[in-house]
Amino acid sequence: MMTTRAITTGQTPSPEYDVVIVGAGFSGLYMLHRLRGTGFTARILERASDVGGTWYWNRYPGARCDVESMQYAYSFSPELEQEWVWTEQYATQPEILSYANHVADRFDLRCDIQLNTDVLSATYDESAQRWRIETKDGPPISAAFCIMATGCLSTTNTPHFDGLGTFAGTVYHTGEWPHEVVDFTGQQVGIIGTGSSAIQSIPVIAEQARHLYVFQRTPHYTVPARNRYLQSDPETRHSGRSAYGFDVDLTIEEIKADYAGLRERARNMFAALAFTPNRKSALEVSESERQREFEARWQSGGVPFQGAFIDLVSDRQANETAARFVRKKIGETVHDPVVAKALMPTYTFGCKRLAVDTGYYETYNRTNVTLVDVSRSPIERITPNGVRAQGCEYPLDSLITATGFDAMTGTLLNIDIRGRRGVSLRDKWAEGPTSYLGLGIAGFPNLFTITGPGSPSVLTNMLQSIEQHVDWVVACLEYLRERDIPEIEATPDAEIAWVAHNNEVANDHIRSSCTSWYIGGNIEGKPRVFMPYVGGFPVYVEKCNEIAANGYTGFSFGAVSA
Ligand code: FAD
Ligand code: NAP
């Protein structure tokens, strides 16, 4: 059993732990579980009223994962893998949230999770070699190590719209959706944004609303999910096959029989996601073979479409063949040619994160859906009655902002984090985030970020990345304790070299060729830096393992002058 003792700092009794973890999403839950049995005392501080992170907050209609559920699941426990039953190929938000709750209960984590606790600041006390963590309510908490498991997409972004506060109806953000059911039946609804969240919710809301107005600034590439039930059911048409991957046709039982094999294949893939990529170049094959390959993947569904050819992300001409194919599909699906044209993206395919949808383009054929193109002239203002754009007022009962997140850095910088000599992370990252491996930050000893900027994180199946980071951090903590080392910190030189390597791989990459949240392009004034590591999961893991095996090269065990 873990123990907690109260120490006194000034007048305030301060609980003291070996490790404080901020966040009870999949990162925080696994970190707490891994620390169990190691002898480290640990506590999670979570601002929400329950566990689940992303899946606690994003309850909008149609929310589900776009990584197949059998892969978007922890791999650390074979028993958990075997006992949990996913009902659909792409799990819904309620099902993923109940999985997170199941994990918290099954591994008895709740007693060390403090909910409704908003962390405001974390300050490193150099003389005590401890972090002092202040929360909105309650006494400060002291910890030798502070783990930021705060998520990459956990601070919503609502851009400034003149008059937003005057709107007489209800405003919803997809990332802060109410817990009670929102019924749009009979309503005029507006939605701003056409990213992944909007693409998932638009078809569902369109079925309910009297009329849905979609305000689109930039069209997004999306491919059909072709979601299926995973359970064989003789009463229905569902066979329960095709549980994962392009051209791989397995039942849930067959996958479970070799779950470890699936995980191993995933870990060897660029995005830590198992599917069958085509090793051919899009430019080396005939036009008919190219179309056949794209068509087969379009019919099969999901992100394996991106694996149609090996050079879709490395060669502009190859990339354009995929872009043209998707535009052709939009043209064939959407009846009104003007609407179809407005929905066709012209930037590089896959630059913004590819969305996976169910009936998205088809929705624009409904008579109760209107696409309002705000690409050339922005939304003018929000009025008490609705949205004013293109010189018209669109009267609305409800307005949804599907405008995304201050991704990767926003949540960390909302916390006042101060390292050596009181230097704040906000100042250090004023020109953009810098880190060593997305795990450690020079000047901030004994602080780790799970899937921080500079790690593959959002470019991968996040569950795999989370497990890899947590396992690495726990091994590091054990290494320190075995050697009686109280402090670890990324060296400035290692951080500079890692950032340079990140920039080098990102600069020519298709992912950095357009404005997206990957480069902070969705937030006014945010430095334009490509934030995730785009070198691929296997290369990254090898680097992390090598660093650990060599005694944590690039980290110092005590103060280093900057
Ligand atoms: P989160 O789940 O974001 O959890 C972080 C937690 O930290 C939150 O609960 C938050 O409340 C808490 N927190 C933050 N700041 C504080 C503070 N100051 N004080 C206290 N608590 C704090 N990834 C995939 O790989 N596949 C998908 O299909 C996929 N779908 C997604 C769909 C949506 C709608 C979104 C938004 C993201 C999706 N992601 C997906 C990414 C997703 O964020 C990760 O897969 C994963 O859930 C992240 O887990 P986490 O624990 O690292 O972070
Ligand atoms: P997003 O991709 O950032 O999309 C935000 C949308 O809002 C964009 O269409 C953007 O247009 C628009 N927008 C922003 N400001 C605007 C303004 N002032 N006027 C008009 N439009 C404006 O956010 P998201 O859809 O929430 O997705 C974020 C990430 O979360 C995804 O990329 C993905 O990683 C994850 N996610 C995954 C899933 C899933 O399928 N599992 C679902 C949802 C989210 P511009 O493009 O012009 O900026």
Image (spheres, rainbow, N blue to C red):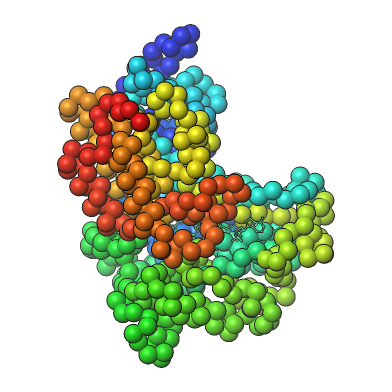
504 left or right of 161 in image: left
Which of the pair 374/193 is nearer the observer? Answer: 374
The image quarter containing residue 458 is bottom left
Instruction: State which quarter of the image contains the C terminus.
Output: top left
Determine the residue located farthest toward the top in the rendered image. 11
Q: Quadrant location of residue 359?
A: bottom right
Question: Who is closer to the viewer here, 221 or 237?
Answer: 221
Would you place residue 515 above or below residue 340 in this image?
above
Q: What residue is shown at x 20% (from left), y 24% (from top)? A: 484
Q: Position of residue 559 (x, y in %)?
A: 30, 25
Image spot of residue 363 (x, y percent): 63, 73
Left or right, 395 with reference to 15: right
**The N terminus appears in which quarter of the rendering?**
top left
Q: Position of residue 251 (x, y in %)?
A: 32, 70
Q: Nearer the viewer, residue 523 or 122?
A: 523
Q: Is residue 150 above or below residue 372?
A: above
Tell me the quarter of the picture where residue 233 sits: bottom left
* Left or right: 160, with 240 as reference point: right
Q: Is residue 388 visible?
A: yes
Residue drawn 53% across the image and 47% down it = 527
Q: In the picture provided, is 477 more to the left or to the right than 499? A: left
